[in-house]
Image: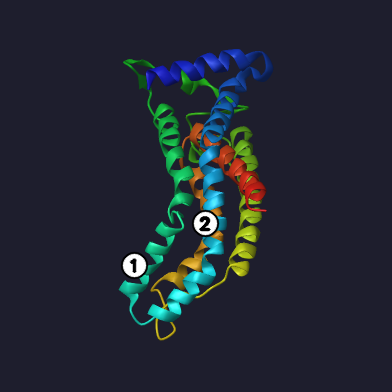
Amino acid sequence: MSVFANLVEQLAQLLEPLFHASAAAAAIVLFTAFVRLLVHPLSRAAARGQKARTELQPKIAELRKKHGKNPERLQRAVLDLHAEEKVSPLAGCLPGLFQLPAFFLLYHLFSNRTIGGEANELLGHELLSAPLGHRWADALADGGAFGAAGLVYVALFALVAAVAVFNYRRTKRMMAANAAPVPVADGEQVPGMGAMKKVMPFMSFFTLITVAVVPLAAALYVVTSTTWSAVERAALYR
């Protein structure tokens, strides 16, 4: 982790003439963009997989009619169809999974007061007036929601909310376009599927909670990645 801390510190020094006291925050945004660029091929593959799965829907509907009263056989038939067509049902999860190490690295980096036995100098960096190692609760305790640090979080919450609304509308449109019941027997749906479909459009709003409880540095990663993801998915799934 000390190696990564040195990289962030060096990048912040390079950006300091442009961003001054917020150079470390800018370094985190650039680091996030770099991670997203590395993951982009997986995102493109996930988009192709989603389109392929959509094209399989007519065949899956036939399998449901044929094996609707035998859930185990239906599941095997659907998996065999995916294997035959070389479509992975889990491809869409890979971009998110590959980003988790970067997020947790930033989280721990800005949660520890010492790194390699020495004081963590990164905790002294700020985004405007908000320390990168602090959380929203610290901002509330130091000036309130509309204090100098609190306003930084207000801006982040506003951006996350705007992205969440965009994702909500887009998800609702996609679910309406691809709506198809998943019966397992006599018209019954897979247990929990109905609830999942109701919750799915609201998933983006959970990012607000993440931004509120993690250190500001990790929150910056989440906000940048979420915004990138919304723009990327709008382009890939249009």
Residue 78 to residue 122: above or below:
below
The one of 99 and 88 positioned closer to us in this rendering:
88
- Residue extending farthest to the bottom is 186
Q: Position of residue 196 (x, y in %)?
A: 46, 66
- Residue extending farthest to the front is 84
Q: Which residue is mark 2?
A: 203
- Residue located at (55% from left, 17% from top): 11
Q: Identity of the amino acid at label 2?
A: Met
Q: How many marks?
A: 2
Q: 146 left or right of 42?
A: right
Q: Identity of the amino acid at label 1?
A: Arg
Q: Nearer the viewer, mark 2 or mark 1?
A: 1
On residue 76, the disc is: 1
Q: Is residue 139 visible?
A: no
SS at circle 1 = helix
Q: Is residue 85 visible?
A: yes
Q: 214 left or right of 161?
A: left
Q: Quadrant of the N terminus?
A: top left
Where is residue 229, by image quadrant? Answer: top right
* Alpha carbon distance from label 2 to label 1: 29 Å
On residue 218, the disc is: none
Q: Position of residue 30 (x, y in %)?
A: 58, 27
Residue 112 to residue 196: above or below:
above
Residue 143 to residue 200: above or below:
above
Q: Position of residue 135 (x, y in %)?
A: 49, 37
- Residue located at (40% from left, 86% from top): 186
The earlier-in-sequence mark between 2 and 1 is: 1
Q: Position of residue 152 (x, y in %)?
A: 62, 36
- Residue located at (48% from left, 76% from top): 62
Q: Residues within 10 Å of mark 1 (few under 14, many from 20)?
A: few
The one of 141 and 136 positioned closer to us in this rendering:
136
